[in-house]
Amino acid sequence: MTLEQFLQPLSTGLSHNPLTAFGITFVGGIVASAVCPCTVPMGLGVAGLAGASQVRARYGGLQVSAAFFAGIVISLTALGGVAGRLGALATESFGRNWALGMAVLSLVAAALALWWPRMPIDRLTAWRRPGVVGSFAYGVVFSLGTSIAPFLLLLTIAAAEGRPEIGLILAFIFGLGRGLPFLLAGMAGSVITGFTRLGLRSRTIQVVSAAALLTVSAYYANVFAELK
Amino acid sequence: MSDHRSSARATLLVFAALLVPVDGMACVACAASVKSAVKALPGVVGVEVNLEKRNARVTYFASLLTPDRIVAAIDKLGYTAGMPKDAP
């Protein structure tokens, strides 16, 4: 069964049984994560980012992964409000630029994961907020190119209903499902780092985190090259 | 003899364009892998993947490649290619 077939019952079920339709949309977001090849490298990247943040602050990993999750959900909800213009996000030229942007962002995140823990504590405190804001922005940029095809299909179904508010609700619920695996990956990264925090392995965690983000960067650089 | 040769050369240069529906693509990375796999086929001149319409427009030399091979290359990736149509 393809994702399109999975979402198809929405076209008849939205007006008859909205709760079931919302449930299908939420699971659709999770299924989109399962079938999207970006999920595994990006999940590793978010876990790495959360792990590196956990080394710096007690709840740093949780904050960063929650910010990334919020970035995805808020961005997709906002996109639901401008559904008529979303076709521009599905073009190859946008895809090329998006993949390049993701490669550069991931590279910057990898560099920061290595560099941040070496900063003096007072400067670290000052940088914590940008870390969360940066994660949020990373989530926003990621959501623009990933899962755009099922998302467009979802909004097409909502548009057929002729009620824009339904598009917003479906976009929000889809965003929750799409972002959930990354929130869980980030939390897992934080927990693992938390266990080893008291030991002498924080340098290893930083290197592993940076390596995960470098993998994401290389992955999107390859996507960019394939679309050329 | 010379007519025969130029006719053979003309056959080699027969250019075709197809629109192949592709189900199962989720994101830009999916589009990139479809594009890369089809571009690797001999005789393919260009591939343009449209995520919104969920299809791929393939231009190729008809004497070097058949539509079946394009469909097979997409199916092999785990996506579902539909019946190709002549592209405008």
Image (tube, rainbow, N blue to C red):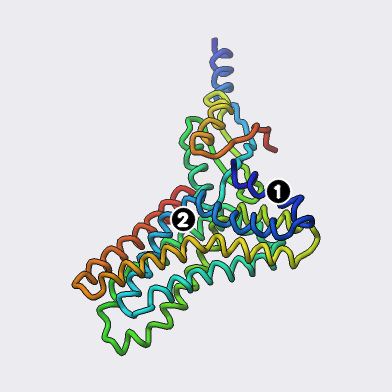
Q: Quadrant of residue A155?
A: bottom right
Which residue is identified by label 1? A9
> In the rendered image, is residue A109 in sight?
no
Give the chain letter at badge 1. A
Secondary element at tag 1: loop
> Is disc 2 in contact with disc 1, using a CB cutoff of under 8 Å?
no
Which residue is identified by label 2? A39
Provide residue A72's location: percent of width, then percent of height. 54, 67
From the viewer's perspective, tell me whether residue A169 is left or right of residue B70.
Answer: right
The residue carrying pointer 2 sits among few (fewer than 14), some (14 to 19) or many (20 or more) residues within 10 Å by Cα, namely some
Q: On screen, A225 above or below A205?
A: above
Provide residue A199's location: percent of width, then percent of height. 20, 73
- The structure residue drawn at horizontal position 21% and vertical position 69%, both measured from the top left corner, is A201
Provide residue A216's location: percent of width, then percent of height. 39, 58
Give the quarter of the figure containing the N terminus of chain A.
Answer: top right
Please tell me which of labels 2 and 1 falls first in the chain: 1
- The structure residue drawn at horizontal position 67% and vertical position 62%, both measured from the top left corner, is A170
